[in-house]
Amino acid sequence: MAGSPTARRRRLSIELKKLREANGFTCAHVGDALDWSGSKVNRMETGTGRVQPSDVDALCRFYGTDDELREFLKSLARQAKTKGWWQAQGSGIPSWFSIYIGLEQDLSTLRQYQSEFLPGLMQTPAYASELHHATNQMPAEDIERAVHVRMERQSMLTRTDAPDAWFVIHESTLRNVIGDHRLMREQLERLLEAMELPNITLQVLRFDAGPYPATGPFTLMGFPDPEDPDIVYRDGITDAIYLEGAEDVREYTRAFDNLRAAATSPHHSAQLIKMLLKEYAR
C-alpha cells in the first residue's frame, strides 16, 4: 500500500469510485441515500475534498462491504489526513505542486522529458535558486524553503527502494547558461554524478536529432501497486494538470518512447556533458 498521505488519498478515491460503480449507483443516488449532496460523493471520489473515516464507514455499510475492506478504507482516510514533510514549508510550496511531491514519494518508475531546464531532481542548490529568483514570484525566505524542499526530494533517487528513473533532456537545457559558467560547471558535474546511479538513465536530445514529438516538458509517474494507475504530470507558472485517463497515459508513453529513440545514447550523452564541462571551464 502506498505510503505518503497524497498517495493514500488517491488510493482511497479510486477504491470508493470502484465500489460505487460496481453497485451501479450514480453519485446523486448515493448522496440521496445518505442524505448528502451528489457533489460531496463526487469530491470524495476525485480527491478534491477531505474524506472523514465516518464518511467511509457510512459508504461501506451502504455498499455492503465486508468488515476487512471497511476497516482498510477507514485507515486510508485517517492516514490521508496527516501532513507530508514538505508541507511544513508553507508558502514556499504551492498547493498544486504539493500534490506532485506527495505522489513522487511513492513512485516505482519515473519518466521525464525536459526541454527548457534541467530536471529538478538533479539540480544543485545554486541552479535551483537562480530559477526561483528568475520568476520573481516569491519572497527570499520562500525561495530558500523551496530550494530546501527540492534538495530533500532528491534523496528519493538514492533510497533503498528508489524508483527506476529515465530522463530525456533537450540539448538546449545544457547550453542555456543559468547564473554563470562556474555555476554551470557545478551543475553538469552534478548531472554526471547522478548518471552513475544504477537506477538512473539520462539521454540528451541533440539539436540535430530531427523531427520528434513537440510535447513540451512532462512527467510520467508509475506506482508499485497495480491498483494505482499511472499519471501524466504537466505544470505551468501558476498551476498543473494531472492526466490519469488510459488514452492520455498511452499517448504520453508513446511520445516518451519516441523521444528516447531520437535521443543519443546514455554513453554519448555523458560524453557531450563532459565536452560542455570543458567549454564552461574556459
Image (cartoon, helix red, strand yellow):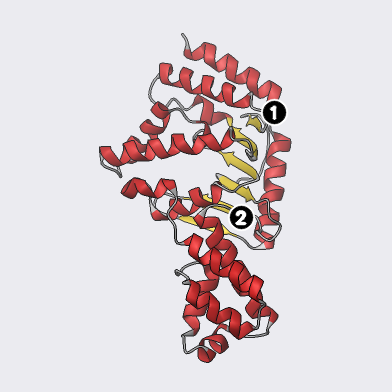
Quarter of the image where one finds residue 89: top left
**Relative to 282, does residue 10 appear above or below in the rendering?**
below
Give whichever of 138, 20 is nearer the camera. Answer: 20
Q: Quadrant of the N terminus?
A: bottom right
Residue 215 in sight from this viewpoint: no
Residue ranking furthest to the front: 67
**Relative to 127, does residue 281 appear above or below in the rendering?**
above
Q: Secondary structure at mark 1?
A: loop
Give whichever of 114, 242 is nearer the camera. Answer: 242
Q: Residue at coordinates 54% horizontally, 87% vertically from top-left?
A: 28
Q: Position of residue 190 (x, y in %)?
A: 52, 23
Q: Indicate the amino acid at tag 2.
A: Ile
Q: Indicate the amino acid at tag 1.
A: Thr
Compare marks 2 and 1 and give the one earlier in the sequence.
2
Q: Position of residue 40 (x, y in %)?
A: 47, 79
C-alpha span from label 2 to label 1: 26 Å
* Contact check, label 2 and label 1, Cβ < 8 Å: no
Q: Which residue is labeled 1 in the image?
A: 264
Quarter of the image where one finds residue 141: top left
110 to the left or right of 280: right
Q: Nearer the viewer, mark 2 or mark 1?
A: 2
Q: Secondary structure at mark 2?
A: strand
Q: Which residue is labeled 2 in the image?
A: 231
